[in-house]
Image (cartoon, helix red, strand yellow):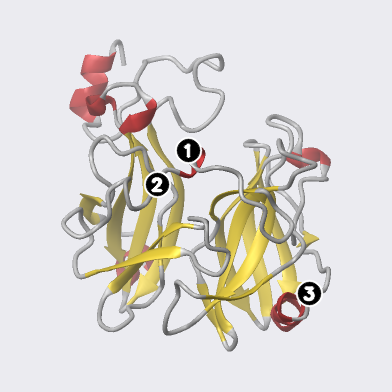
Amino acid sequence: MKNSEEMKRHWPFTSPAFPIYSMNFFASGGGWGGCEDPRAVLMDGIIYLTFNVFNLNNGWKWDSMRVAVISIKEKDLLNKKWTWQNFSYLSHLGDRQKNWVLFPEKINGKFVIFHNLDKGDPNKVFVSYVDKLDTSETPTVKDAPDPQVLPDHIVAWHKRTRSAAAPPIRTKDGWLLLYHAMDKDNSDRYKLGAMLLDLGDPEKILYRAQYPILEPDEWYENDWKPGIIYASGAVIKNGELFVYYGGSDKFICAASINLDELLKSIKHDRIIKLKNLKIKK
């Protein structure tokens, strides 16, 4: 593409702000344009994908970042029939938002959207219940503030929370929510935390791991952007939790742990770590 106007005609929602990538301008946070941090859930035969959008039509600035959702039928995805549909924004124009995630099932007949890890109460997270996946019922930045502007708040092992990691996973002990945070001694290193939310009232935190369950200690987690692990997906298979994450914004990584052992450690304040698996460059 020769210029941004031509790009806008081809990609009206996600066109990059500049035709050529610049590491100086866009070293972090998806500022070049397009979509990032996809998180998928399956409900009633439909896969819903939430992601962050950096839209040139809103101008190249941080508050142009919004959360959007798109969907595809599970059978179409399995048959490689890429009929994505129902693109819609979830966050409001002018509100810098990212990393909202959907719960994988409705509660009381409504979609449940996770917004904030920390609004000052260590016993709660912030979610909203909506009938439609659009901006008609979702909160503005006043009620769901950008985590970047929130003050540090020491809870468990961390002083600053960043975002949810993978979408919540239903377990026998509650919704398992993995999240990103930094502690007071390593404020430049993302670490992975874990908590259990009430199944019927997912704003309520039942248990929180008192120690991080994954830290960026491997070489491939420090090769490009040092100290960054960023998880967007997790699944349970044969009693094992597999977590998929980006290492240093350069490598595709995975780690795993026995689910029951993880749940026990969260409930009884034990130290436990995910086991790193092979990486793909």
* Mark 1 in CB contact with mark 2 (< 8 angstroms): yes
Q: Is residue 171 left or right of residue 81?
A: right
The x, y position of residue 28, in whole percent, is: 54, 29
Question: Is there CB contact under 8 Å for labels 3 and 2?
Answer: no
Q: CA distance from mark 1 to mark 3?
A: 30 Å
Label 3 SS: loop
Give the residue at x 42% y 43%.
Answer: 146
Q: Which residue is mark 1?
A: 149
In this rendering, position of residue 8 left or right of residue 31: left
Q: From the viewer's perspective, is residue 14 above or below residue 141?
A: above
Disc number placed over residue 269 in the picture, else none: 3
Q: Nearer the viewer, residue 14 or 76?
A: 14
Q: Dot 2: what SS?
A: loop
The label nearer to you, 1 versus 3, is: 1
Please state the horizontal and vertical placement of residue 276, each as a whole percent of the image.
78, 58
According to the picture, the residue beneath numbered tag 2 turns out to be 145
Q: Could you tell me the amino acid type at mark 1?
A: Val
Is residue 180 rendered to the left or right of residue 255? left
Could you tell me which quadrant the C terminus lies in?
Answer: top right
